[in-house]
Amino acid sequence: MVNWSDPNVISLCSAIFEQLNFLCLGVYIWEYAQSCQVELALIYRRIPPRWPLLPYIIGRIFLLVGMAMICWLSSPNSQASDCHSAFMVFTLAANGAIGCSSINLMLRPFMIWKGYHYVRMFLVLATIGHWIFLLRMLFVFSVMNVDGSCGFMVVDHIEITTLFIYTMCYDMLALTLTIIGLRNMPSSNVFRKTLRIHGIAYVVATCVANIIPMVMSLLNLNTVMNVAFAIPASAVSTIASSRIVISLLDLQSRYK
């Protein structure tokens, strides 16, 4: 049996965690470069600014900043900085990306249930609750220095498990309302086909991505493993929700 509380095991987990973060950063930079058509279209005024694009753009930027920061914080160069303040900025960026990706998913049922004000109000309240959980993480962590670097965040496993469970329930709510709403649409509706094929698949991918860090935080193996898979889950969620936005914009450009 592995003694997950052993300092040598924690140090090994921290080294793997660092390499995993660099891998995620590389993958996301490649994904960002491959899918920056919305930002370019806004810059060159090929599409008009619209408020639903705000969580898409802000979430992508937040995740890029968060990934770059966690890679820097795990390097020896970070030791000279104020680690707690730096991790607070990282938490704001990373959790902001999670919140924005969930808003991207929730915009679909919000659009489908147009005219049902009680449903929309429930979605708004659920979104506010999600952001309360996300912002709470700014104040419930400490820092553990590792091998001459700022190391990693130490968060109570109950706190982070609660956040992942709420995020999964929030995304499942978006999926459920999307499925129910699509059943009320005519089968010939082109938006119905796109939302059914792309939207549902991407929400399922997001939910599955959040299962792994939730299970690891529930197991509470050690302080590193509790947060080790949070960045990969955030990357998958942001990529999946961003592709939903792109698919809807492509559809609108074809049928406008």
Image (cartoon, helix red, strand yellow):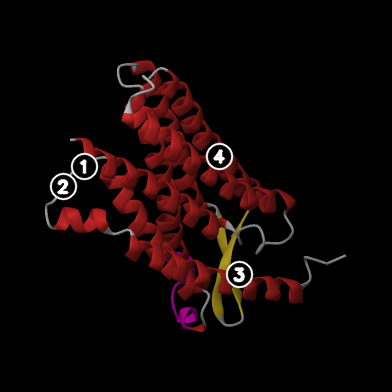
Quadrant assignment, res 85:
bottom left
Q: Which residue is mark 3?
A: 17
CA distance for labels 1 and 4: 31 Å
Q: Main secondary structure of the magenta part?
A: helix
Q: Nearer the viewer, residue 97 or 191?
A: 191
Q: Secondary structure at mark 3?
A: helix
In the rendered structure, find residue 47 and report the number of the disc placed on it: 2
Q: In the image, what residue type sits under mark 2? A: Ile
Return the disc, 1 or 3, that comes first in the chain's sequence: 3
The label nearer to you, 4 versus 2, is 2
Q: Are marks 1 and 2 in contact (CB under 8 Å)?
A: yes
Measure the C-alpha gap from mark 4 to mark 2: 32 Å
Element assignment for label 4: helix
Residue at x 42%, y 70% (from the top left corner): 68
Question: What's under tag 4, amino acid-wise?
Answer: Met
Return the residue at label 4: 168
Q: Residue at x 27, y 43 (%)?
A: 249
Disc 2 packing (10 Å; few <14; some 14–19; many ≥20): some
Residue lying farthest to the front in this orientation: 188
Q: Residues within 10 Å of mark 1 (few under 14, many from 20)?
A: few
Q: Position of residue 247 (x, y in %)?
A: 34, 44
Mark 1 or mark 4: whose residue is earlier in sequence: 4
Residue type at numbered disc 3: Phe
Residue receiving disc 1: 253
Q: Residue at x 61, y 81 (%)?
A: 147
Range shown magenta: 77-85
For marks 1 and 3, give the one nearer the viewer: 1
Which residue appears farthest toward the left when viewing the image? 45
Answer yes or no: do the residues labelled 4 and 2 have beta carbons within 8 Å? no
Q: Report crowding for label 3: few under 14, some 14 to 19, many 20 or more residues within 10 A (C-alpha).
A: many
Local SS, label 2 = loop
* Quarter containing the C terminus: top left
